[in-house]
Image (cartoon, grey):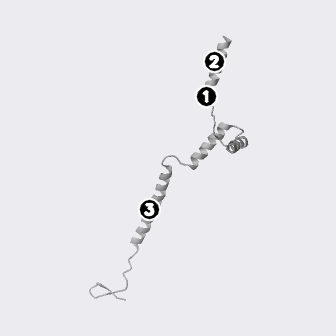
Amino acid sequence: MEDEEIKKKVENFNQRLKETALGVNKMKPEVKKRFLEISKNDFANDHGVTIEWLVKLYDGYFPKGTEEQDAKIDLLADEIEKIKGELSSLKKEPEDKGDFTLSADGSRKIRKS
């Protein structure tokens, strides 16, 4: 009975290990050394938390999906609104008709320069 109990505990342990273990291959020695330093100095040697932090950092610097395009579209929309505002203010300003004289009937005659 003890052997079966030990087998079940070992199987349970191995299953949990498979679910949480992460093997890293083909890592340059200097990168591994730096990762371990970061983990030790900033995360109490907790590699899982260090990886989580790196993933969050990566996601912050490199937007997923269409976030980057959406941000560019928003900037362009803001620029278009600025241009529209400037155009409407230019349209409201009176046009410079140049020098003119009023005739007796009220019509304007533009003087030639």
Circle 3 SS class: helix
Task: State the quadrant of the N terminus.
Answer: top right
Gap between marks 2 and 3 measured at Cα = 67 Å
> Residue beneath label 1, please?
18
- Along the line of sight, which residue is nearer the eye, 73 or 88? 73
Gap between marks 3 and 1 measured at Cα = 54 Å
> Residue beneath label 3, please?
80
- Along the line of sight, which residue is nearer the eye, 18 or 92? 18
Task: Relative to 98, say whether 34 is above or below.
Answer: above
Amino acid type indicated by mark 3: Ile
Q: Indicate left or right for 107 with 66 as reference.
A: left
Residue 32 at what x, y percent from top left? 68, 42
Q: Residue at x 41, y 71 (%)?
A: 90
- Along the line of sight, which residue is nearer the eye, 66 or 95? 66
Q: Indicate left or right for 13 with 77 as reference.
A: right
Amino acid type indicated by mark 2: Lys
Q: Residues within 10 Å of mark 3 (few under 14, many from 20)?
A: few
Mark 3 or mark 1: name the one nearer the start of the chain: 1
Residue 64 at what x, y percent from top left? 52, 46
Amino acid type indicated by mark 1: Lys
Circle 1 SS class: helix
Q: Which mark is residue 8?
A: 2
Q: Residue at x 39, y 79 (%)?
A: 96
Task: Relative to 5, say whether 47 is above or below.
Answer: below
Q: Residue at x 49, y 55 (%)?
A: 72
Task: Answer with the quarter of the image where residue 13 lies.
Answer: top right
